Image (cartoon, grey):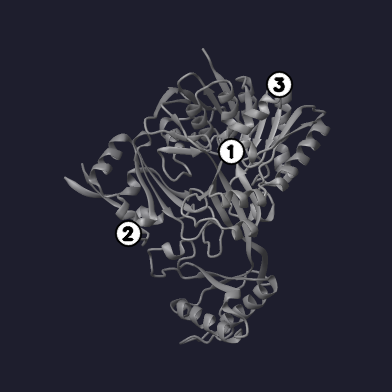
Amino acid sequence: MKEIRVLSPVGMLGYGFPAESFQKGLEKKPHVIAADAGSTDAGPHKLGAGVGIVSKEATKKDLTLMLTAGYEHKIPVIIGSAGGSGAEVHLNWTLKIVKEIAKEKNLHFKMALIHAEVEKAYLKKKLAQGKIKPLGPVPELTAKDIEEATRIVAVMGVHSHIKALEMGAEVIIAGRSNDPAMFAALPIKEGYDPGLALHLGKILECGAMASTPGTTSDCMMGYLREDYFIVEPTNPLRKCIPSTVAAHTLYEKSSPLHIIGPEGVVDVTGCKFEQYSERAVKVSGSKLKKSKTINIKLEGASKVAYRTICIAGVRDPIMIKQIDECERHVRKTVLAYFNDISPEDYRLIFHIYGKNGVMGELEPQKEITSHELCLILEVVAKDQELANTICAFARSTLMHYSYQGRIATAGNLAFPYAPSDIPTGAVYKFNIHHLVEVDDPDELFSIEMVEV
Amino acid sequence: MTKEVSIVDLVKVIRSKNAGPFELTFDIIFKDKLTYEKVKKSKVITKELIAKLYHIPIEKVLYFVEFDPANAIKATIVRPVDSGSIGETDVYGAQQHAPLLGIKIPYEE
């Protein structure tokens, strides 16, 4: 029977996984070990500021186990969306860690670095050619957006990973990658069904999340055969059942029926999820519909402001009843006091926990029933100094506002911290979330071979 | 006999999460096939209901899909602000599901 085995040790490189689970996975003789190291989930800051989501030490710990195993068993190790966002700075950060590990453990291998950061001049040309369109509910792209982005990455599919494997890479450290790509690349290269391979990749990219009890911090094994695949967690304390695997198929996606990527659309409408053995689930019926043109997703982030926050509690019931009036008063007073500053240059935001702090305008419950509130006064402004200044003024105004019926005249706010005001630095926004049509993915992704 | 049953008693999972930085998606996964089919037949959970529960115009409900293989109903809406932008309250979108917990289903015993 034809079969290829893919080991996913962890749902996010640096989240950590049990060494015993990993060992159990290795005993199944995987043909490749792969992991996802990135996501847009934590917001635009990582891409914008060029930082990661996990610590260097945690990444090193996970990578040490993976690289050592790959070296001993002579199987490729593939990391996608390196460093969190997969731009150059993230790739270099990961490369440094890989080199440290190789030196300490005396490992030697052929490594492919796949670059995913996009040059602005290239994108402007594509824009002028009408080859860029919005992805989801976002506006049309402008040259100004491209100019303002601090970093832009393109999201690669299996194409570049396969190419790196064909060039003899034993380790692949790839920039921004479509989540299933690292897991599906070797199977597709070996001639397995791409629809099934990509669907398997979608399940494996979160580690053992599609099992019960689910977690991203444990290992999952994928077995791809001719017309179905099987997934099974390697930790005997977990198991896959059809509902956990089916549920994961729709996780974090707009529509459950289609898994969309650079290769086209995987249609899972006619999928079957069946119990295969006690802890394993069999999936069949996923079909790839190749797209006529090659459309690659672009992600860009731009710096839009600087932020200062102040956290404070309110316990006085007379004030809680008038919290909206207190907010109005602070807004009015800030506007009047800073009449020499354009209101365009800053924004004052009240997060009122106990009222609608979590859901904001989506909150259906209008009445406050809590005996205490947590306020976060947030000021975003064109520079840090202005954010600090306005936050301090808003805080002192609210602290001493004499609202209707006030009998607690010492102060209105309980600060858990001194200093009460916390500058948090630059604020970013995803200003590019578009598709670019290319003739060849190689236009965007270059492969650099390195001997380690 | 028909009675009203809280959706919380009929599901395994109700959750919200980002689907990319610009969309928020809700998954309602029922306990079993029978329950799922009954809820589907009741036609209580619709695109219109999602719009009503979140006080948004129906055009902002981008997808509404019944997914039989998972015994699940899924809806995706436009995020109030894009993830992590100014005005954000929930970067991962993981705590926006509460209004769904109040859904009641007329249920035949």
Pointer 1 local density, CA inside 10 Å: few below 14, some 14–19, many at least 20? many
Residue with the mark numbered 3: A74
On the rendered structure, is A44 left or right of B41? right
Residue with the mark numbered 2: B52
Residue type at numbered disc 3: Lys
Quadrant of the image for the N terminus of chain B?
A: top left
Is A8 rendered above or below residue A138?
above
Spatial CA distance of label 3 from label 1 is 23 Å
Label 3 close to label 1 by CB (< 8 Å): no
Residue type at numbered disc 2: Lys
Spatial CA distance of label 2 from label 3 is 56 Å
Nearer to the camera, A452 or A325: A452
Q: Quadrant of residue A184?
A: top right
Q: Which residue sits at x=71%, y=30%?
A: A171
Secondary structure at badge 2 equals helix
Nearer to the camera, A397 or B69: B69
Residue with the mark numbered 1: A11
**Residue at the limit of the structure toward the top, as seen here:** A1
- The count of marks equals 3
Pointer 2 local density, CA inside 10 Å: few below 14, some 14–19, many at least 20? some
